[in-house]
Image (cartoon, coloured by chain):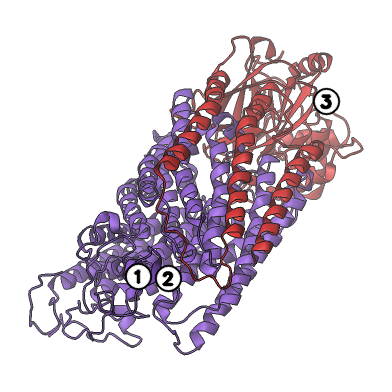
Chain colours: A purple, B red
Amino acid sequence: MASVTVSTQKGILRRPMATTGFWSWFTTVDHKKIGILYGVSSFAFFLIGGGEALLIRSQLAKPGNTLLNADQYNQIFTMHALTMIFLFVMPMSAAFFNYLIPLMIGARDVAFPRLNALSFWVFLLGALFLNSSWFLGGAPDGGWFAYAPNSVVDPGNGMTFYAIGLLITGIASTVGAINLAITVINMRAPGMSMFRMPVFVWMGLVVQFLLAFSLPIITVALFQLLFDRRWGTAFFDPTRGGEPILWQHMFWLFGHPEVYILILPAFGIISEILPVFARKPLFGYQFVVFSGIAIGFIGFGVWAHHMYAAGLGPVANTAFGISTAIIAIPTGVKIFNWMGTLYGGDLHFASPMLFAIGAVAMFVIGGLSGVTHSIVPSDYQQTDTYYIVAHLHYVLFGGAVFGIFGGMYYWWPKVFGRMLNEAWGKVQFWILLIGFNLAFAPMHILGLGGMIRREYTYPASLGLTVWNQVSSVGAFTIALSVLLFIINVVRTQAKKRALETDDPWDARTLEWTTPCPPPAYNFAEVPTVHSLDEFWHRKYAEDETGRLVRVPAGASGEAHPTADGHGIHLPSPSFWPLVISLGFPLLGYGVLYSWWLIGAGAVVIVVGLIGFVLEPSVAE
Amino acid sequence: MMRGKARRNLLWLGGALVLASALAACGKDLPQNTFDPAGPTAQSEKDILFWPLVIAGLVFVLVEGGIVFLAVKFRHRPGRDQLPTQLHGNTRLEIGWTIAPAVLLAVVFVPAVSLIWQLAERPPNAMQIEVRGYQWWWGFEYLDQDMQVSYGDHAPITTADVLVIPADVTIDLSLVSAGGGAHDDEGNSDHEVIHSFWAPRLFGKQDVVPGKSGLDNHIVFSADEPGTYYGQCAEFCGLQHGMMKFRIVALSPTDWQAWVLHHKEPAAKSPTGSAAQGMDLFFGTNGEGGQCIACHEVGMEGASVNTIAPNLTHFADRSHQCFAGCDFEVFNPDGSCNQQAIEAWIRDPSAVKLGAKMPDYGLPDDQITALTDYLCSLN
């Protein structure tokens, strides 16, 4: 948006001007505000998905339980997965990326600020659309993996909501991915070469490429599923000439890169936190970056390890077994480099550090059980059991959610100008660590002991009641930990902004050169970057004896920005992203209920797009 | 703080070991324990995991122990103001910890790959049985020439819910998805969907896939000893996926002979008392009833097959322990017929198994009792 044509057009397409106040949140194009919107809404969905998890664990707390019937249970486990994956971890990662990537690369906003707003609103409305199914005859109940032909013949509207809901949120992710990838590639400050970028930005870039290449595959599959269900096409139903295994290939060809879409942001967060609190640079920066890229590439070549039991034959099973084992190697490289970062450090165990180390320690367990899945014959036993549930939660909860909590504690002062309470944070960490292991470690036993996934109840004769009960206790312990986090947030936000310094952690990267919270324009003066960990190098230099000493403030040559930011051009707010977004759920309901609604949705989208395109690029 | 972390990690480690040994120890109380194999297929699938588990355990101890060690050793000590050495990396180490795991993985993978191919083989002399997955129960059809019934059109012997096999004989299961078109109370029909056949102590899973791609799916296995082995559908297949269980009853050679002979015979034609009334209702002979025979077979003259509903020819045979997805026992612990469960099922299938494809016919109590007596007479 560097060379905009200044327009003085007035009238119906006038842009909203307010950048503060309640309504400004609906028109904002500021990447920081959009980041906060993403964060708040995805955290709300985290609570909803968590509530669903508690219902699941309550139902399984005793054999033959009738708290939930089969129908309710199937809806809840399906929505738990959909909510946690698509409505929590993905948008929460988008929250971090949106807020931090421009700040970390020395940019004033993302490449396309209005598209950024569009991503958020499309995501939120898609998420609300998906959840509205609860009140419109029942939520999706065919599993997040939606195996055809069950997902095709499944009665009710649930799986149609699934297909449309994921198509809408997929639009949000695709738009966001392109926007953030272009931001990283094109908007870096002078001197910020690719290999001076923080690892978090690198992981962000890899994730955006994964999204851009994997979402089209699931989009096609979802359209096929939707047409099979709604208009009688026969892509997946074999009784009408379709091919059910086709769905599995397309779903997992998206679904496995999706796993890395969920975990790489946390890897980025961990890679930022460890050096700051070890007070030394990340060990093997290039190797951490390249292993992340390698994971992204290999992640596209392992999808059929979800299908060992599907009958693809020994050649396919061998090939995908080997590729699955190979992906463990770059993942291991990351772990070892994080340990190398701790080695010889001066470790400060503030809350972010605890969560980051916890994430590494827990992810390792998920990684190791993952390696056992690559041993194909033993996976015939493990697949579709609680052993897999244990594995995926060690990876996604142990890795991604611990990482996300670490990131929240670490960047909270940056975003809100207040420190979350450290004592509460530490207590929350230990309770979470205990609750997490209580909830998910027994699931290894459950799975190897013969308990399948997705069954709404089990008989006492299965002999696994005790471990189910331990797991349920663990789930409620996790809930307690999350409650402590919420109380901590409320207590913190109730206080006045009081941050002694804009750099509370003695951090290393550019986002901490700005005030907390940063002004709308981020940098009064676009920084010039000379090295990796730019901020650190501005603060510390070697003295005559080779000792690292702190550079006196103001002596670093690059003065702390004192300019007031007047005269910096920023994109004006716009309500058109919200207008366009409103059209998508209308289209969705139209597919379910009425051609008239399809028309209305289409009109809203077209009008919104025209408004989006024609609105004056600068407010008068 | 760190001391606490170290202690907790050690506790956790100890806990994990205790859990693992617990699993091994109470194996007999876990009817679906994958670590308690009862046949060569499950045995090989367990054994192949041994070295990977040992290596994973070592890596676990190394990494978790390493993290705790590093966290304790390099913790910040009060009063320290000197920055640590700004170490940026070490290329030799990087190469080392890239290659070492690669070598380890390659080593454990060779036997794993060989086992993949071994398990895919179909021995020529194995007993052929077709497994059919319905929503939500399993049907079994004995395909071998000498496993045909002696009456009617000499169809294969067929059972539902319980697969009876001779112990120590290699079995080759062909897996078929067979939605039959039965409808539940709300008109939702039984579809050909994906299931997965799994008896943990005997063999790992293989999906039951409708359509062309599932044609070759099979499982080769045998049971070392006579006994009852538990299994269930492992791939989500709709509403009652959790209640799609089965049992495999392995018999000694003499018991097997007797079982086969018995199952070649048709059901009794003239039951007595209430059961006779039930038989009339079952077939609708006297212009009353007849709903059962619309879907269920009881082999007497015609075929004896699983159509869209389980074949009931030998419903109360000793080996037929359970019905309707093996959720309900056919016999009480004292060996008598479990009239209560059978009556409850006939009264309203969906009340005891939500969404079951057998409709509620609203039969009066005396008819339900008579039908139950008839079913209990089908030994």
Residue A72's spot in the image, x, y percent?
A: 60, 58
Q: Is residue B166 left or right of residue B102?
A: right
Q: Disc 3, disc 2: CB below 8 Å?
A: no
Q: Is residue A147 left or right of residue A618?
A: right
Q: Considering only vertical position in the picture, is A572 above or below B110?
A: below
Reading the image, the residue beneath label 1 is A99
Q: Which mark is residue A39?
A: 2
Please state the chain letter of the residue tagged with numbered disc 1 in the rendered image. A
User: Callout 1: helix, strand or loop?
Assistant: helix
Q: Do the residues at pointers 3 and 2 share their chain? A: no
Please state the chain letter of the residue tagged with numbered disc 3 in the rendered image. B
Q: Nearer the viewer, mark 2 or mark 1?
A: 1
User: Callout 2: helix, strand or loop?
Assistant: helix
Reading the image, the residue beneath label 3 is B270
Residue name at image x 65 percent, y 24 percent: B44
Q: Quadrant of residue B335?
A: top right
The amino acid on which the numbered mark 2 sits, given as a three-letter code, is: Gly
Q: Considering only vertical position in the picture, is A184 above or below B233?
A: below
Q: Nearer the viewer, mark 3 or mark 1?
A: 1
